[in-house]
Amino acid sequence: MEIHVFSGLGSSWLPSLRTGTTRLEALIDTHMRSVPVDAQHHIWNDWPSVARDIITREKRGKAMGPIALIGHSNGVLACANIAKKLNEGSIAVSYIAAIDPTLASFPAIYPNVLKVDEFWATSGGVAMGRRWLGKGKCKIIDPSRTAYRTFIVRKNHVQSAEDRDVHLRILQSVKELAA
């Protein structure tokens, strides 16, 4: 199983903003020891190299099993971009966890993505802007192929990535992939 966790734009400048996504990666590593899992943490703009690596392994027949992409803020855009590239090569993405995507990052989710969980923060400028501008959820291109669930996180944008309940819900979805 291959898991890629992406932190957002702010973490490019302030490593302290990666706390939530690095904790989530550690939680997955800790609870998935009985299954061969490769969980890696990335900054959101590293997505092109991650996509190339997955495609290369797939072409060589060295795929690592189900692919899970987890992102916070602009990290959700990274997940969507990778999924789009993998869709071009007919490579499935088993799961995307979208933790409070930024307004600019409401991505299109292609039919190669089997399941999406989106977590919306309810306070702070990003959440308020989303409501005022009429922005909404990830855009599922083919709802008959992609299962989609929305969860409300009663926290602000940064806290949503650090929320223990969000982490446990994502961990549960990842465990279901491994089963």
Image (tube, rainbow, N blue to C red):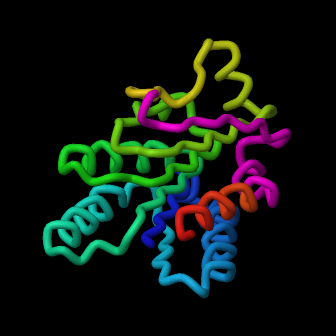
Is residue 115 inside the magenta stretch? no
Residue farthest along the left direction in this orientation: 60
Q: Residue 13's image quarter?
A: bottom right
Residue nearest the viewer, comparing 17 with 100: 100
Region of the chain picked out in magenta, as a range: 144-166
Residue at 27% across, 63% down: 49
Residue nearest the viewer, comparing 17 with 51: 51
Is residue 150 inside the magenta stretch? yes
Q: Is residue 9 visible?
A: no
Q: Is residue 128 left or right of residue 90?
A: right
Q: Is residue 86 left or right of residue 137?
A: left
Residue at 54% across, 82% down: 35
Q: Residue 17's image quarter?
A: bottom right
Above-or-below relation of 96 to 125: below
Above-or-below relation of 175 to 44: below
Q: Is residue 2 left or right of residue 99?
A: left
Residue 56 lies, in percent from the top left, at 18, 68
Residue 87 lies, in percent from the top left, at 26, 45
Residue 161 lies, in percent from the top left, at 70, 54
